[in-house]
Amino acid sequence: MPNWIAMAVSIVGKLPIERLLIKPRDNTKALDELASTLRASQSQNKPAVSVNPTPSTQEVAPALPKQKVATACVACAVGHFSTSVGLLNEAVRFEKEGINSNEIADRIAKILEEQNALERVDLTPEKIRSTLEWERKLAEEALQQSRGLRHRLETLTTIKELKEIAADTAGYYRRLHREWYHLRITQPGEARPGLTLKDAKKMAAEEAAKEVEAKWT
């Protein structure tokens, strides 16, 4: 018997009988199943990532509507000067009490309120710029006249000056009202709707009354 055969017989004789009769277990399939289970577990525990599609175009915010700027109110200027003329005439009636009279001081304070409101609300530069051309000239002049009136009242010291201011203001108011009254009617297509007959009579009566009042003071 060759030596290698004797050696093989010797090794086989030393192995347990189970190793010779039972087929060795194949662990490859079990390892593959374990790996598959681990991969499935990891995929379940991984948080889902939400993918938002990138918009093809950017959203543009809507443009804000352009606000219309109000126009200068020449009619308001007429109203403010009308009130101031009346207050000046009332102040002159208290001339016997002297320039330090509270009656005169209170009426001057009201006049300053009227003209301040006219300048800071009705005749602002932005409003004057956006108004009609024929009204713009009246508005610009009314603004200058209002400033002049305020400055004269702020430096007033005598009854004589008060009378001069009252006369000058009444004259300007009369001219302003007449120009505005005629132009707003004779500017078709540009001027605001004309006055009704009732309104025209009322304004004419007020103007006539003020003229009479001015002559009697």
Image: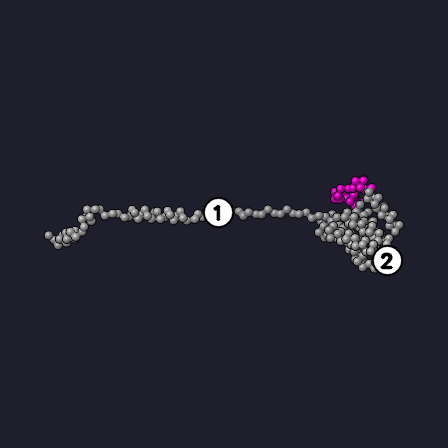
Whether residue 8 is visible, yes or no, is no
Disc 2 marks a residue whose amino acid type is: Gly
Q: Residue furthest left?
A: 1
Crowding at mark 1 (Cα within 10 Å: few <14, some 14-19, many 20+): few
Say which of 88 and 51 sits in front.
88
Residue 98 position within the rendered picture, expressed as x and y whole percent measured from the top left: 86, 57
Q: Earlier in the sequence, mark 2 or mark 1?
A: 1
Residue 164 position within the rendered picture, expressed as x and y whole percent measured from the top left: 85, 55
Q: Which residues are magenta?
A: 182-201
Identify which residue is drawn at 33% across, 48% down: 35
Q: Is residue 21 left or right of residue 57?
A: left
Residue 161 position within the rendered picture, expressed as x and y whole percent measured from the top left: 85, 57
Question: How many marks do you count on the picture?
Answer: 2
Q: Name the residue tied to disc 1.
A: 52
Identify which residue is drawn at 27% across, 48% down: 27
Cα gap from disc 2 to disc 1, whole angstroms = 84 Å
Q: Secondary structure at mark 2?
A: loop
| Numbered tag placed on residue 91 in the rendering | none
Residue 192 position within the rendered picture, expressed as x and y whole percent measured from the top left: 75, 43
Asked if residue 188 lies in the magenta stretch, the reply is yes
From the image, state whether disc 2 or disc 1 is nearer to you.
Answer: 2
Q: Secondary structure at mark 1?
A: loop
Identify which residue is drawn at 59% across, 46% down: 62
Disc 1 marks a residue whose amino acid type is: Asn
Asked if residue 179 lies in the magenta stretch, the reply is no
Q: Name the residue tied to disc 2.
A: 98
